[in-house]
Amino acid sequence: MTAKKTIGYRIFTNIFTLSFIAIALSIGGQIIYAIIYVLFTVFYMVFTHKPGLFLPPVLDTARLYLTDIVPWIIAILIFLPGKRNVYRPVLRDCTHKEKGNTWWSIFLGILIGGGMNLFCALVAMWNEDIFIRFDSFNFLPALFIFACVFIQSSCEELICRSFLMGTLLRRYRMPWMAILFNSLLFGSLHLFNDGITVLSFVNIMLTGILFSLIYYFFDSMWCIFLAHTAWNYMQNIVLGLPNSGIVVPYSIFKLDAASARDSFAYNVGFGIEGTLVADGVLLLACIATVIIGKLVTHKKLFVRLPEDAFPGEALWNVKSAPVIEPKVEAAPELKETSEFNSSSETVELPMEEIARMLASATDETQNKDENENE
């Protein structure tokens, strides 16, 4: 097996392993949550003698979004910073120590996610594909649901962006590869959603690429967390539209589902995410992010980053960080002497001149001795 094939096989194996860990965290955590919920429902039915667990719309909506709370907690525990934890930079990416995590990035994330989704919905309403009506608004329930949506959205970003993309980026230092593979996994996690189509899969992949570009160029997980949360919250909780094919009981506006129709701006089975309009908006957002990112940060996508691109994270690299030897300068006197000796040239003197110099030195010595005797 050649060296190139060996390296390619090693990269493929590592990507497969990391993807398996990410999928196990996501799906495995959801299975654990489902088991806990079923057991709780059974105990509730046994002790209350009721035919089932009937939740109000707010709690039922929260239940749907909290399916990711178990993988969210597991991911946080696994990625806790520690000297022996090779995945410690995952959670560090989410702290204020990362230069891109600012209050401005939170506002920008809400503007990006909520603004793009609202624009797509307005196009669908303008084209008379959907009609919505105001239902009700209560601040505390809306805030509680926002927190639940944040847990679900940040869990996906923590696994796909910070863990998978971050690991690939630090280990192989090829941005395009890290962005592509983590976005493919992000799209694959939604393949079993109701109403999935080719356009909706492309939409989810473009969403993953957009969030990956923001993470790479601007080093801001906060912006990605809030952008993802705002996108889901706007279409599902505010507007009452399907979120990746899922409709929830609680929303501020209600969709007239009977009059909804398929078009270039809306998909009845999947919502606005399965349309040409949403794909076009996300594609333009990706292009704009690349252009702005290159102008502001001077980073490149199709390049191999240097080994010292991630200082202080030697455990993430294939090779250990280089040891820098302390530079010790010679003393000034020795340095000057060394320079003089290196620059001097050998001069040959005639024998007569040497004899004259010896006689002069002898006369000086005799005169000095006579003076001392006197």
Image: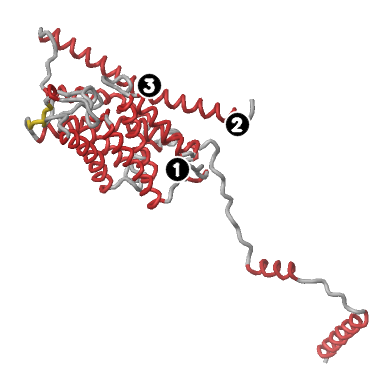
Q: Please name the amino acid that badge 3 sits on.
A: Ala
User: For the residues marked 3 and 1, what is the alpha-carbon distance in whole angstroms?
Assistant: 29 Å
Nearer the observer, disc 3 or disc 1? 1
Q: Please name the amino acid that badge 2 sits on.
A: Lys
Horizontally, is 2 left or right of 47 in the view?
right
Q: Which mark is residue 368?
A: none
Please name the residue that numbered disc 3 is placed on. Answer: 24
Q: Nearer the viewer, residue 195 or 213?
A: 195
Q: Residue at x 38, y 27 (%)?
A: 185
Q: Nearer the viewer, residue 283 or 305?
A: 283
Q: Please name the amino acid that badge 1 sits on.
A: Leu
Residue 347 in picture, x, y percent from top left: 84, 74
Around disc 1, counting alpha carbons within 10 Å, would you say few (fewer than 14), some (14 to 19), or many (20 or more)?
some
Please name the residue that numbered disc 2 is placed on. Answer: 4
Picture quarter with the N terminus: top right
Q: Earlier in the sequence, mark 3 or mark 1?
A: 3
For the residue labelled by badge 3, is the local secondary structure a helix, a strand or a loop? helix
Q: Residue at x 56, y 49 (%)?
A: 324
User: For the residues marked 3 and 2, what is the alpha-carbon distance in whole angstroms?
Assistant: 30 Å
For the residue labelled by badge 1, is the local secondary structure a helix, a strand or a loop? loop
Residue 119 in picture, x, y percent from top left: 21, 39
* Location of residue 64 with respect to 338 vertically, above or below: above
Q: Earlier in the sequence, mark 1 or mark 2?
A: 2
Q: Residue at x 55, y 26 (%)?
A: 9
Nearer the observer, disc 3 or disc 2? 2
Q: Quadrant of residue 115?
A: top left
Residue 154 in picture, x, y percent from top left: 29, 33
Around disc 3, counting alpha carbons within 10 Å, would you say few (fewer than 14), some (14 to 19), or many (20 or more)?
some
Please name the residue that numbered disc 1 is placed on. Answer: 301
Q: Nearer the viewer, residue 208 or 145?
A: 208
